Image (spheres, rainbow, N blue to C red):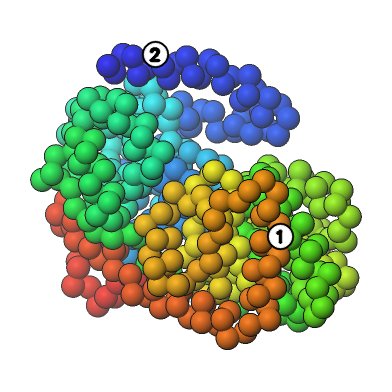
Amino acid sequence: MYALYTLGLVLTAVALSPYFIYQAVRHKKYLSTWRERLGHIGHLESSGAATVWVHAVSVGETLAVYPLLRVLHDRAPEVKIVVSTVTETGQAVARRRFGEWARVIYFPFDFGFSVRRCLEAINPSLVLVVETEIWPTFLRLCRRRGIPVILVNGRISNRSFAGYRTVRSFMERVLDHFTLLLMQSARDAERILALGADPGRVMVTGNLKYDLEIPNVDQKISELNDVFDLTGSPLIVAGSTASGEEKWVLEAFAILSQKSGMENVRLLLAPRHPERFGEVAALIERMGFDFVRRSEAKGERVERSSRVILLDTLGELAAVYATADVVFVGGSLVPVGGHNILEPALFGKPIVIGPYTSNFQAIVDEFKAEHALIQLSPPSPGSYEQRLADIFEQLFTDARRREELGRRARHLLDRNRGATERTLAEIGRFLGAIDRASSNGGVH
């Protein structure tokens, strides 16, 4: 079965090569990362201390594991940490968050030769895999080398579960390479067990994403206000939007703007993927909005006549959420699976999402049960824009409801904290250097 998997991987790489070549030529993507993805990661300083390799595929996983690694580093600074990602956006976030005290690399292609090179260079004492990054060759070679592998913050989405069930016998063999499987919820645990995981290795430790650090965004907010005066008028933030969603949000904003008392509302769009910034800018222009790009407004004050702002930079979304009056979290009007609603919840903001939220289903279900967000149901064709406009208008005309949604969201987030400590307790069985009784007392 592993031979068939490798063959499938090779055929997939060949089939996708025109796309990668196009991206490399057109957008200069992948060119600088090719050697690392083939396992050539360069020299890693050897001090004799334990090394933990943490793999987080992209932005969401990197942010989720940050509190865990921050506490691990604080309590056991002698432990070396290597963080790998697959996506460039994940790499950028990892370098900002971990760059001062961890080595950040690209994860190797899941071929034997590239994985072996990385394992030989890093020589990890322990591997932590975040969420659902299941790479069979990597896991098999870790097992052969006697390296413990722990799945942390594990989850199995509806789509992944359906796909894995078609190859259950293979998945059972792959899951046997994990030493521990620490799952987000009882439903995730049930699914991993249904795929053949050993019940003695499966635990529910909660969702690390609830253990968000409260970021210090005051300076960034001040900088953004100096340029855009974000707090000077009502603001909708549409964060982590996916292809197709910006058009609906902009049409909803156009409808809202025609309503009495809504003339001063502004919209900030933050597309999920940087390579789409130009595409979204062209869309806003075609639709006739007076807008400004964040990348082109670094110093001088922008007039409020620019009612649409395109956030085409990285690392500023948290500060923007903090200034919002209403937040729409993208990736949820199209079948992408949704993005993290906890960051706006951290700032006590009213949250609006679409129907496609399988990536965060357990969190969304809990928020819905506590009336801590508004979720649109699947629409008839063409109805999203009107429904979004109606919801935005209702929230702007009902300050009490706005505040109550935000309060409930923050309360629910606070109530679910603690996964970091439970996860560290399990990791501590493999890294005795972690002092759980540290006076730090957890995530602050």
Name the amino acid, label 2: Leu
Answer with the quarter of the image where residue 259 lies: bottom right
Q: Is residue 194 left or right of residue 415?
A: left
Quarter of the figure that contains the N terminus: top left
For the point 25% across and 66% down, the residue is 421
For the point 24% across and 77% down, the residue is 439
Q: Does residue 309 appear in this view?
A: yes
Q: Is residue 1 left or right of residue 60?
A: left
Residue 16 percent across, percent down from the top left:
56, 21
Q: Which residue is mark 2?
A: 7
> Residue 386 bears which disc, if any?
1
Residue 319 percent across, percent down from the top left:
61, 70
Image height check: is 306 above or below 44? below
Name the amino acid, label 1: Gln
Quarter of the figure that contains the C terminus: bottom left
* Mark 2 burial class by Cα count in 10 Å: few <14, some 14-19, many 20+: few
For the point 55% across and 74% down, the residue is 349
Image height check: is 224 above or below 425? below
Image height check: is 37 above or below 178? above
For the point 28% across and 60% down, the residue is 206
Residue 52 percent across, percent down from the top left:
29, 47
> Residue 186 bears which disc, if any?
none
Label 1: state its secondary structure.
helix
Looking at marks 2 and 1 on the same chain, the residue that comes earlier in the sequence is marked by 2
Q: Are marks 2 and 1 in contact (CB under 8 Å)?
A: no
* Mark 1 burial class by Cα count in 10 Å: few <14, some 14-19, many 20+: some
Name, please, the residue furthest toward the left.
200
